[in-house]
Image (cartoon, rainbow, N blue to C red):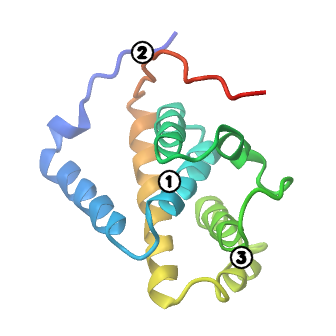
């Protein structure tokens, strides 16, 4: 049985919530661009099992004009060739930052070097850290996914 969240973190800790929003907004104005940020946010949310954030970031990517198959395949990005080398490097780094597994982290970081300068690598790491924070807040406070009308079905 799901409990009803008793805490609204944006109300109970308003200043902290606003600071986290401001950090996300600062990163959105950075060098990575909205598509890459949302791609990374979606993958991190999938890893963490945050239904609320998976739904939000998938919808955000679709609203940006990304095609349904590209968005749907983020969970299997290792297995498909839909993503650029830079996107693949960013996804690999996002996974390394999220899981904190030492194995493979050096390779994931090395894959970033041809595609991202020092500022972009730093921003990408901050994006991952902030998204992990949002996921932990949404999951532990049981943010619910609102059922909305279906998206248009992709042409077959």
- Mark 3 or mark 2: name the one nearer the start of the chain: 2
Tell me the residue at 68%/29% (across/down). Answer: 154
Which of these two is toward me, 132 or 60?
60
Q: What residue sits right under mark 2 in the picture?
A: 3
Question: Mark 3, residues whose alpha carbon is within 10 Å: few (<14), some, or many (≥20)?
Answer: many
The count of marks equals 3
Is label 3 in a helix, a strand or a loop? Answer: helix
Tell me the residue at 35%/67% (across/down). Answer: 27
| Vertical position of residue 103 compared to residue 113: above or below | above
- Eye-nearest disc, 3 or 2: 3
Is label 2 in a helix, a strand or a loop? Answer: loop
Residue at mark 1 to residue at mark 2: CA–CA distance: 29 Å
Are the residues flagged by discs 3 and 2 in contact, CB closer than 8 Å? no
Q: Which mark is residue 24?
A: none
Tell me the residue at 28%/22% (across/down). Answer: 6
Tell me the residue at 65%/23% (across/down). Answer: 153
Residue at mark 3 to residue at mark 2: CA–CA distance: 38 Å
Which of these two is toward me, 136 or 122?
122
Are the residues flagged by discs 1 and 3 in contact, CB closer than 8 Å? no
Question: Mark 2, residues whose alpha carbon is within 10 Å: few (<14), some, or many (≥20)?
Answer: few
Quadrant (top left, top right, bottom left, bottom right) of the C terminus:
top right
- Mark 1 or mark 3: name the one nearer the start of the chain: 1
Question: Mark 1, residues whose alpha carbon is within 10 Å: few (<14), some, or many (≥20)?
Answer: many
Q: What residue sits right under mark 3 in the picture?
A: 108
Are the residues flagged by discs 1 and 2 in contact, CB closer than 8 Å? no
Q: What residue sits right under mark 1 in the picture?
A: 38
- Eye-nearest disc, 1 or 2: 1
| Vertical position of residue 146 compared to residue 126: above or below | above
């Amino acid at each position: 049985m799901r409990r009803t969240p008793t805490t609204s973190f944006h109300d109970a800790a308003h200043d902290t919530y606003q600071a986290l929003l401001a950090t996300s907004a600062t990163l959105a104005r950075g060098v990575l661009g909205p598509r890459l940020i949302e791609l990374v946010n979606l993958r991190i949310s999938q890893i963490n099992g945050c239904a609320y954030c998976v739904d939000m970031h998938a919808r955000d990517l679709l609203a940006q004009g990304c095609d349904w198959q590209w968005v749907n395949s983020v969970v299997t990005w290792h297995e498909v060739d839909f993503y650029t080398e830079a996107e693949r490097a960013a996804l690999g780094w996002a996974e390394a930052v999220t899981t904190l597994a030492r194995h493979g982290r050096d390779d994931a970081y090395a894959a970033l070097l041809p595609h991202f300068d020092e500022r972009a690598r730093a921003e990408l790491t901050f994006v991952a850290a902030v998204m992990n924070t949002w996921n932990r807040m949404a999951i532990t406070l049981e943010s619910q996914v609102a059922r909305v009308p279906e998206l248009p079905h992709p042409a077959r």
